[in-house]
Amino acid sequence: MSKSYFSRRPQTGCGSNSVRASSKHTTSPLRALGWKSFFQQQLSLDELGSCIPMRVMAVHRSQLELAGEEGALTLSLTPSLAAESLTIGDWLLLGRDDNRFVRCLERNSLFQRMAPGALQRQLIAANVDSVFIVSSLNEDFNLSRIERYLALVRESGCRPCLVLSKADLCADPSGYLEALRSYKELPVVLVNSLDCDSVAPLREWCLPGETIALLGSSGVGKSTLLNTLSGADLALTGTIREDDSKGRHTTRSRTLFPLNCGALLLDSPGMRELGLVHVEEGVAQAFADIESLAQRCRFSDCRHRSEPGCAVLASLAGGTLDERRLRNWEKLHRELHINHQTLAQKRAGDKALSQLYRSVQDQARKRKYSGE
């Protein structure tokens, strides 16, 4: 194996104080990579002696970057390995003697979406503990998009934190904070991503062995935030278009970066499309107020349009429920229904195609043995 993965961590800059603080506590390299008892308990006695666990730190077109207790290595993606649907953050078991892939351990959290332009799901990341949902204090700020991210995070069971970036460029953030007034259980932090002191509250989340994902659209400052928290230029950064505050893609792939404090930060490309799939529980948690109102409607199949005894409409008329929030809740439910049907139809089509292939092969074998 190559030298230790942790030798790549910066030792200067904004994170230097946390390096000195964490030096008092010794953490094994495996635990520093996010190894927990949840994964340890999945190993059999044979695997404890014959296998080594390694974490996927980056996914490329033809290979995986892995890190483990003994260092780092690169694993080529073969067709059989690619079929495992591995993603960044996964824990893999490799043969101790030959680095042969054995299996992927069960995940304690998973982020996925409908792949843009494709009838299939796309894995985003696995085994994440907390998520920084990053949004700028400018035209990028969008409550409906924040709710979409929040549903994804709630479904995974991770802890969310809303990070409002570019606070130094916003003369009065009170309007943004007022818009978030109903999100009482969502931690909100205003930051200037370029300033070490400004991002200090986020370091409370960056505990040793914790994996934190940065989610947000392009141009909100995710890579800048990563660089400031780490104290080094780990990721490329760019500018936004001044006319609409839209960002340009500077991060091209998802990568896990170890920080001086012992946490791991996952930087990912901005996602202009985040098609939700299999996040029904996440939507219910993100819109718990509306879900509770819907349970009090007179009719169990109430569509919240003009039905008598509709608690949702009554709350809307009384001004305690925002119409935008209600419409977004309905939109996400429709999207989940459509995506579920799309995936079900694709599975049915794939099954029918496989049966057709087997039928053709069976007929060919029969003709061959019958001498036709």
Image (cartoon, grey):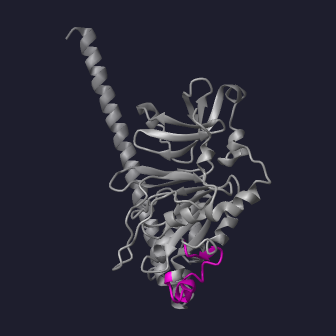
Q: Which residue, as the protein is rendered here, is positioned at the far bottom?
A: 318
Name the residue at 55% across, 51% down.
256
The correct choice, above or below, for 363 with respect to 274 in the image is above
Q: From the image, which quarter does the C terminus lie in?
A: top left
Where, by quadrant of the figure, is residue 54 drawn?
Answer: top right
Foreground residue, 123 or 209?
209
Comparing 337 with 122, the one in front is 122
Q: Main secondary structure of the magenta part?
A: loop
142 left or right of 182?
A: left
Quadrant where the N terminus lies?
top right
Where does the image place residue 242, in percent across and percent down from the top left? Answer: 36, 78
User: x, y percentage for residue 183?
Assistant: 60, 78
- Asked whether, in this view, residue 171 is left or right of residue 109, the answer is left
**Which residue shows up at 41% across the image and 57% down it?**
339
- Residue 177 falls within the magenta-colored stretch: yes
* Marker count (numbered): 0
Magenta stretch bounds: 169-193
Q: Is residue 101 visible?
A: yes
Q: Quadrant of residue 29?
A: top right
Q: Position of residue 74 (x, y in %)?
A: 50, 36
Residue at the front extreme of this rendering: 12
Q: Point out residue 345 in the picture as x, y percentages from the top left corner.
A: 37, 49
The residue furthest right is 24
Q: Residue at coordinates 57% horizontally, 24% vertically from top-left?
A: 98
Residue placed most toward the observer, 117 or 371: 117
